Image (cartoon, helix red, strand yellow):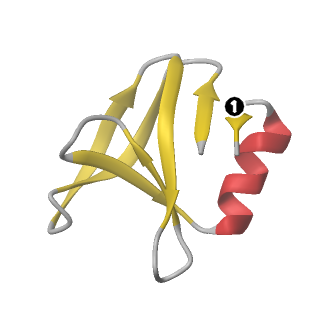
Amino acid sequence: MRIKITKSLVLNAQIHNTETVPAALFPEGEYLANLTPDGKIEVINTKSIKALFSFSQFREKVSQGDFVVVEA
């Protein structure tokens, strides 16, 4: 799916699925988001940097207006 981040956010992120980064900037714009095998939603910033959300965390971001689902 594609999502739009409506304002620049600093999110906890991972690099290459192994290293957790305390904060990564996700500027306002459109991003690819995938459902992982363990039921998380990953928002991909670059090929190596992504943020993971549980469904409830993702839904909260949508309800707050931080994320808009552009294409499912």
Residue with the most extreme bottom position: 38
Residue 25: percent from left, percent from top: 35, 28
Residue at 56% x, 78% y is 39
Apparent side of residue 55 relative to residue 22 in the rendered image (left or right): right
Give the number of marks: 1
Apparent side of residue 68 relative to residue 37 in the rendered image (left or right): right
Apparent side of residue 45 relative to residue 47 in the rendered image (left or right): right
Q: Would you place residue 39 above or below residue 35 in this image?
A: below
Residue at 46% x, 71% y is 36
Question: For the N terminus, which image quadrant?
Answer: top right
Residue 61: percent from left, percent from top: 71, 44
Residue at 60% x, 18% y is 7
Badge 1 is on which residue? 66
Q: Would you place residue 4 above or below residue 36 in this image?
A: above
Residue at 61% x, 34% y is 3
Q: Amino acid at mark 1?
A: Asp
- Quarter where residue 24 is shown: top left
Residue 17: percent from left, percent from top: 20, 65
Apparent side of residue 15 relative to residue 66 in the rendered image (left or right): left
Q: Would you place residue 13 above or below residue 63 in this image?
A: below
- Secondary structure beneath disc 1? loop
- Neighbour tally class for label 1: few under 14, some 14-19, many 20 plus, Cα within 10 Å: some
Q: Would you place residue 63 above or below residue 58 in this image?
A: above
